[in-house]
Image (tube, rainbow, N blue to C red):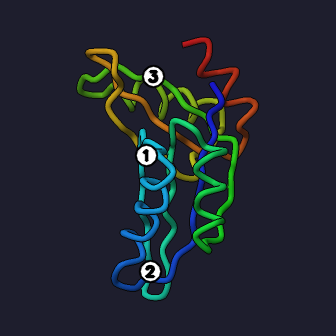
Amino acid sequence: MKIKQVSVFAENQEGRLQAILQALDTASVNLRAVSVSENADFGIVRMIMDDPEKGAKALKKSGFTERTDNMLSAEIPDIPSGLLNTVVLPLAEAGINIVYFYAFMDQKPGTARIVLKTSDDEKAERLLSKK
């Protein structure tokens, strides 16, 4: 299924993550998942929120450059090889590359959820929806 992800590009400096989270807290936006990647100069904070439009607006108001993207999300069994057998192998067999992903625990017991960007999101969504 499709899900909205809000990304913030932030300088890799002390207090930047705190400021991002404070902006969301002030707007009463709840994070469902977060991924932070970085290099020496900047980081990318990718977030799944309960209200992505409200979150994006709060971040802009606080001076952050944000970007909202449609991503894929898939439920996987929370078992050994759940990710491998449910997502990675089927996509690889279809010739679809996973550009990046991150995972989080689902509210449904025994499951986890992943957010992913692929080389062909439309084809990947059709394939994963059959699983």
Which numbered disc, 1 or 3, marks the residue that appears first in the sequence?
A: 3
In three-dimensional space, the C-alpha distance between marks 1 and 3, rounded to whole angstroms, equals: 12 Å
Does residue 32 sit above or below 74 in this rendering?
below
Position of residue 125 in the picture relative to residue 89 (left or right): right
Q: Position of residue 87 (x, y in %)?
A: 49, 29
Distance from disc 1 to disc 2, alpha carbons, whole Å, reads 18 Å
**Crowd band around label 1 with a 10 angstrom C-alpha radius: few (<14), some (14–19), many (20+):** some
Amino acid at the residue labelled 2: Asn
Residue 58: assigned label? none
If the image is split into quadrants, where does the N terminus sit?
A: top right
Q: Is residue 34 left or right of residue 111?
A: right
The residue pinned by badge 3 equals 75
Near mark 3 (Cα within 10 A), the count class, few <14, some 14-19 or many ≥20, is many
Residue type at numbered disc 3 = Glu
Viewer-proximal residue among 28 and 21 = 28
Label 1–label 2 contact, CB within 8 A: no
Q: Quadrant of the C terminus?
A: top right
Q: Does residue 79 sit above or below 18 in this rendering?
A: above
Q: Earlier in the sequence, mark 2 or mark 3?
A: 2
- Would you place residue 119 above or below residue 1 in this image? below
Q: Which residue is mark 1?
A: 102
Q: Residue at x 48, y 61 (%)?
A: 23
Q: Are marks 1 and 3 in contact (CB under 8 Å)?
A: no
| In-image side of 42 versus 112 (left or right) | right
Residue tagged 2 = 39
Q: Position of residue 85 (x, y in %)?
A: 41, 24
Q: Earlier in the sequence, mark 1 or mark 2?
A: 2
Q: Report how far apart the C-alphas of labels 2 and 3 lie in the structure.
A: 30 Å
Picture quadrant of residue 125: top right
Residue 74, how many percent across, how many down? 51, 26
